[in-house]
Amino acid sequence: MKPIRQHDYQLNVLVYGYSFARKSSTTARTANDVFPEQYTASIGVGFRIKRVFFEDKIVKLLLWDTIGFEMHCMLRPHSLKGMHALIIMYDITNQSSFDFAKEWINQPRKNTCDSLPAFLVGNKIDLEEKRVIEQTQGLELSKEFDAEFYEMSAKTAAGLRKIMRDLVNKMIKVAKKKKEDEKTEKLRLTQDQSEKTKCY
């Protein structure tokens, strides 16, 4: 019997942002389609797993949920090791959360050699009547730091499916390019070595 393949890609996504942006609720909604009504602060770092189908591939997403990031002066480089993308989340009803995102959105990419795809996400669009951060502000910030911009609601799941689909698409493209670059570099090194060993 042919063994059932577990997945074709395993991709790590770091989700961080200001406390009360409901990062944990977002990862819970993504992985298990549930929304914890009661807010509970994250302690340390945890992760949830979501398997999705993309074209003919099985993708295993590991969504890493960080503690309220304002409690740290910066992300440590080792926190980014093995990550394939970043989700920077803020609350559209909270100015401080947006100011925080504005201050730190580019910090992770200063701490790593890899150019990680970044997604700026405004959460809580179900509370439109309490909005203080306009879409145009989020869009301008995303353009400034070359990040993708989205708005969503962890409570209703509005906009979440598109974010995950685009996130997986972007990460797979980056992964494929990296693999192609590594293959090209390996071929170049092999050719260089072959040239060195030729007898004339």
Image (tube, rainbow, N blue to C red):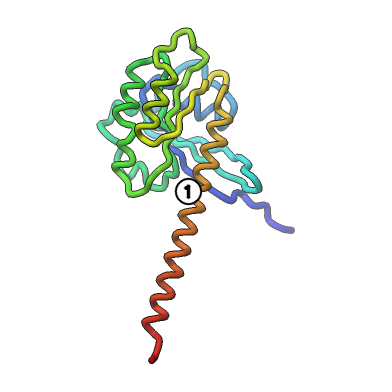
Q: Nearer the viewer, residue 35 or 174?
A: 174
For the image, the number of numbered tags is 1
Task: Report the side of 158 relative to 148 (left or right).
Answer: right
Looking at the image, the residue that sits furthest to the right is 1
Specify few, some or many for label 1: CA neighbours under 10 Å numbering under 14, 14-19, or 20 or more: some
Q: Quadrant of residue 17?
A: top left
> In the rendered view, would you say 180 is above or below 60?
below
Looking at the image, the residue that sits furthest to the left is 73
Residue at the spot 53% in from the left edge and 28% down from the top edge: 28
Task: Report the side of 45 relative to 31 (left or right).
Answer: left
Task: Report the side of 7 relative to 38 (left or right).
Answer: right
Q: Secondary structure at mark 1?
A: helix
Q: Nearer the viewer, residue 128 or 39?
A: 128
Q: Position of residue 80 (x, y in %)?
A: 36, 43
Q: Quadrant of residue 146?
A: top left
Q: Position of residue 47 (x, y in %)?
A: 47, 36
Residue at the spot 33% in from the left edge and 41% down from the top edge: 109
> In the rendered view, would you say 14 is above or below 158?
below
Residue at the spot 31% in from the left edge and 31% down from the top edge: 104
Q: Nearer the viewer, residue 76 or 57?
A: 57
> In the rendered view, would you say 146 is above or below 132?
below
Looking at the image, the residue that sits furthest to the bottom is 200
Q: Amino acid at mark 1?
A: Val
The quadrant the C terminus occupies is: bottom left
Q: Position of residue 16 (x, y in %)?
A: 39, 31
Residue at the spot 37% in from the left edge and 27% down from the top edge: 141
- What residue is pinned by disc 1? 174
